[in-house]
Image: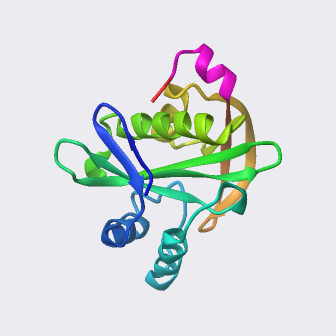
Amino acid sequence: MLALYSDRLKIRTLQDQDWSLFAAIHQDPLLNQYVRTPDPIETIQAKFDARLQPWHYESGDWLTLTIEENATGQALGFTGFYASNAELKQAEVGYMLSHQGQGQGYATEALAAVIDWACLSLQVHKFIGLCAEQNQGSRRVLERCGFQLEGLLRHNYKLGEQWVDDCYYGLLADDRYSAGITG
């Protein structure tokens, strides 16, 4: 089991006990307003079950990690990444926190720890973050972790009947260390 630690958080491998939080976050329309129309519970269960399986960087599957508060042990949400291009050592990052976990810097702290681990353990060269242009909270997380806006992907996906523009952020491993950003 993978377990990473930061000042306030434990970031650990997804476990069966995380199902209720995983389902709640993936079903919440407000938490998903910039991401997706919430899926049926059967689809969410299949996604959860797939992410419980042993993970390998080259698989192209998401490594989903649970974010827990050290002081209370309360699970607050999830973070992780997948190898968007294993040959080029590129990984796309992601994170979703419950309402209780938002606005306290937990996503930034957890993502920084995960990126630090991926640099040291997997020699990831570049991290990519995509988020809806209107998702100011997610943009701030990426920027606080040292990501740079590299472009705008116009009408990159549809959310319901609405086209969504995605901000494309990148972080080179070398830039992360020179900026002094570590988890």
**Quarter holding the N terminus?**
bottom left
- Residue 98, visible in the rendered structure: no
Q: Main secondary structure of the magenta part?
A: helix
Left or right: 81 as drawn, with respect to 58 = left
The verdict on residue 74 being magenta is no
Give the number of callouts: 0
**Residue 100 coordinates in the image, percent (x, y):** 25, 50
Above or below 26: residue 132: above
Residue name at image x 51 percent, y 43 percent? 135
Left or right: 50 as drawn, with respect to 8 = right
Residue found at the very far right of the displayed protein = 87
* Colour logic: rainbow
Residue found at the very far bottom of the displayed protein = 42
**Residue 108 coordinates in the image, percent (x, y):** 43, 35
Residue name at image x 45 percent, y 30 percent? 183
Please name whichever residue, 130 or 29, is drawn nearer the observer in this view of the structure.
Answer: 130
Residue found at the very far left of the displayed protein = 72
Please name whichever residue, 41 or 117, is drawn nearer the observer in this view of the structure.
Answer: 117
Instruction: Magenta stretch: give its range.
Output: 173-181
**Residue 95 coordinates in the image, percent (x, y):** 48, 49
Residue name at image x 30 percent, y 49 percent? 68
- Residue 29, visible in the rendered structure: yes
**Residue 115 coordinates in the image, percent (x, y):** 55, 37
Please name whichever residue, 107 or 172, is drawn nearer the observer in this view of the structure.
Answer: 172
The verdict on residue 174 being magenta is yes
Residue name at image x 69 percent, y 59 percent? 157
